Image (spheres, helix red, strand yellow):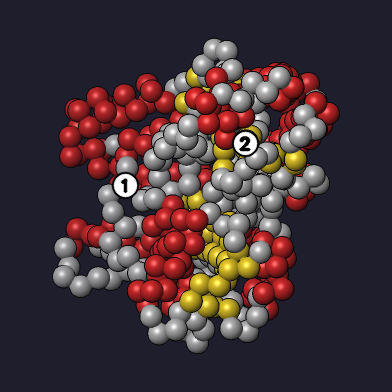
Amino acid sequence: MTQDLTATFAATRALFDLPEGVIYLDGNSLGPLPRAAAERVSSAITDEWGHMLITGWNKAGWMDLPARVGDRIGRLIGAAPGTVVMGDTLSIKVYQALASALELNPGRRVILSDTGNFPSDLYMADGLCRTLGQGYQLRTVAPEEVEAAIGPDIAVLMVTEVDYRTGRKHDMAKLTAKAHAAGALTVWDLAHSAGALPVDLAGVDADFAVGCTYKYLNSGPGGPAFIYVAPRLADRVRPALSGWLGHEAPFAFDQDYRPGHGIERMRVGTPPILQLRALETALDIWDLVTMADVRARSIELCDAFIAAVEGACPTLTLASPRVAAERGSQVSFRHPEGYAIMQALIARGVIGDFRAPDILRFGFTPLYTTMEDVGGAAAVLSDIMANALWDRPDYKRRARVT
């Protein structure tokens, strides 16, 4: 790590409001608060909503905010200007992308995904198939078997690039090329990729991509999702959710729906202005770094954590790929008492999370995670394991959110 990059990441860390005495390794689930976000949102409430009232849609540029913020995220995921738009939730965007992709491939009925995909994506795909009927089906295989399962009956390949449990990373370029060669379209979920590692949607010729912003992009709980549509498809797709703001002329108040131009047609409902303002503040921090530098630092942090934990905690089993190029920006370990161990860690100020049935998950986010955090977290984990400090009834009682 060069001195310049060390200084860069020290500067970005200072821009987050991190609680004293806490080592935060859960930014892959919810990013921390950017220091400037509270003031920015307060200004949006008081100066925009408070003083401008409904004129804020024009005076404060609210109506254009989803496209402007979308372009800023596009820079982080290899998408050209005008191909990403913000709004709604990730599940809604998954549904939109899948429905549009299926309609573009009418001779086929199978959505292919993997058993490591985030359950919500699978639920949305299954629900869409049930709604469509006519033989539409969701087919899942093990993550390692996806490439071999791409065949002439597949309409859409829908995968999350980085496995939310283990951090295993799919090869986007290879799978997209294989899907296209077989006549299938692709929908990539970037929930654990955007802000975690370099993504090149245009370079790999991806068809659709979706993602959330409250993880590595730090927009806050419930922050808006994004959707990408390749330019060659943007004026061909028919939105399954033909919302008012996806209309070609919303304020013409036509009785009949006419899709907007390009990515604008993928808008659905009223955009969440306050959370978009918070996201703008977070993206200001991202403007200070490159994804290549973030990735390099992420690998250093993850490799150091793996080495430290394996050296001190022999009863924990690495669940993430050992080879850095094959994983995202998280490290997961397995243990039968994973939930209790994570609760003991949190009680000691080291915050990660647990994923059923037995995974302790730790996210590494170079914008604010340091090597000191890595060493401190590993030392606390070592103490908990060596002395069985997790073996308490209160650590084994499951909370609603794990």
Q: Position of residue 328 (x, y in %)?
A: 68, 45
Please give the residue where the numbered disc 1 appears in the rendered image. Answer: 271
Q: Residue at x 57, y 57 (%)?
A: 117
Q: Residue at x 53, y 78 (%)?
A: 110
- Viewer-side residue, 194 vs 236: 194
Height in image: 50 above or below 245?
above
Q: Where, by quadrant of the figure, is residue 289 drawn?
A: top right
Q: Is residue 38 left or right of residue 301?
A: left
Please give the residue where the numbered disc 2 appears in the rendered image. Answer: 338
- Viewer-side residue, 247 vs 382: 382
Amino acid on which disc 2 is placed: Gly
Can you tell which mark lies on residue 368? none
Q: Which one is in front in this view, the residue at disc 1 or the one at disc 2?
A: 2
Judged from the image, the secondary structure of the residue bearing numbered disc 2 is: helix
Q: Position of residue 208 (x, y in %)?
A: 52, 63
Q: Note whether residue 8 is visible.
A: no
Height in image: 297 above or below 140?
above
Q: Residues within 10 Å of mark 1 (few under 14, many from 20)?
A: some
Quarter of the image that includes the N terminus: top right
Height in image: 301 above or below 171?
above
Q: Position of residue 42 (x, y in %)?
A: 31, 24
Q: Residue at x 31, y 25 (%)?
A: 43
